[in-house]
């Protein structure tokens, strides 16, 4: 699909205007992608997240906030909070889609031309990978086809083989 691509790798190493963090609602770092971004971004990201927490108490599930990229190659980090999987009957699909939509809206406000997403909620939050990939590709494709955007590239950066294969198949790339 035009404008969408999938890679396998470490999102913290990407050169992009913005990378998206699979954040927790407290914006205080954690494991997986979140911990790696906080470690790689250094004190600037930690301090900016602290300021956001002090101002608004964190970030609700399905929403997103933005900080600088700190010591990362990316100019910005968009911290998106995906849902914890509880069987699919607690608005998980809606909240996951919302986290991606709100990330893309923030990216537009900040004139982001290249953005990279991790596989939000599919790690320790337990969201089924195949279900998440289908929802995300459909929603992001809908977003870029319906919006006037200056974005050149939207990258799905997969850390594991299973997500990489799912996105590659959905985007029909080799």
Image (tube, grey):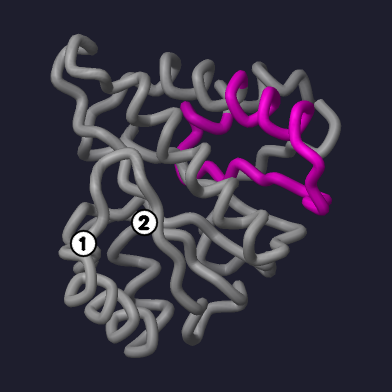
101 horizontally vs 81: left or right? right
Q: Position of residue 167 (x, y in %)?
A: 60, 26
The residue depicted at 79 percent of the width and 47 percent of the height is 149
The quadrant the N terminus occupies is top right
Select label 1 or label 2 by which is in front.
1
Structural crowding at the residue carrying mark 1, measured as other residues with C-alpha within 10 Å and reported as few (<14), some (14–19) or many (≥20): many
> Disc 1 designates what residue?
58
Q: Which mark is residue 74?
A: none
> Disc 2 designates what residue?
33
Give the structural element (helix, strand or loop) at label 1: loop
For the residues labelled 1 and 2, say whether their Cβ atoms are less than 8 Å apart: no
Q: Position of residue 70 (x, y in %)?
A: 47, 84
Give the magenta-colored segment's residue range. Answer: 138-164
The quadrant the C terminus occupies is top right
Q: In this view, which residue lies farthest toward the bottom? A: 43
93 horizontally vs 51: left or right? right
Query: In the picture shown, does residue 144 fall above or below 76?
Result: above
**Magenta residue check for 151:** yes
The residue depicted at 45 percent of the width and 66 percent of the height is 66
Q: Position of residue 84 (x, y in %)?
A: 20, 32
The residue depicted at 36 percent of the width and 46 percent of the height is 63
Query: In the picture shown, does residue 140 fall above or below 12?
Result: above
109 horizontally vs 163: left or right? right
Alpha carbon distance from label 1 to label 2? 18 Å
Query: In the picture shown, does residue 34 fall above or below 90?
Result: below
**Magenta residue check for 157:** yes
68 horizontally vs 60: left or right? right
N-terminal of the pair, mark 1 or mark 2, is 2
């Amino acid at each position: 699909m035009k404008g969408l691509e999938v890679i396998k790798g470490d999102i913290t190493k990407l050169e992009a205007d913005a990378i998206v963090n699979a954040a927790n609602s407290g914006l205080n770092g954690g494991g997986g992608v979140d911990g790696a971004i906080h470690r790689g971004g250094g004190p600037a990201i930690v301090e900016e997240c602290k300021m956001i927490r002090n101002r608004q108490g964190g970030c609700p599930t399905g929403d997103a906030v933005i900080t600088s990229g700190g010591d990362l190659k990316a100019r910005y980090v968009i911290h998106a909070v995906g849902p914890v999987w509880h069987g699919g009957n607690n608005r998980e699909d809606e909240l996951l889609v919302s986290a991606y939509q709100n990330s893309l809206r923030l990216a537009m406000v900040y004139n982001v031309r290249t953005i990279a997403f991790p596989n939000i909620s599919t790690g320790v939050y337990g969201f089924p990978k195949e279900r998440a990939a289908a929802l995300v590709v459909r929603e992001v494709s809908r977003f870029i086809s319906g919006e006037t955007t200056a974005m050149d590239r939207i990258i799905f950066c997969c850390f594991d083989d299973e997500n990489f294969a799912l996105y590659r198949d959905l985007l029909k790339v080799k």
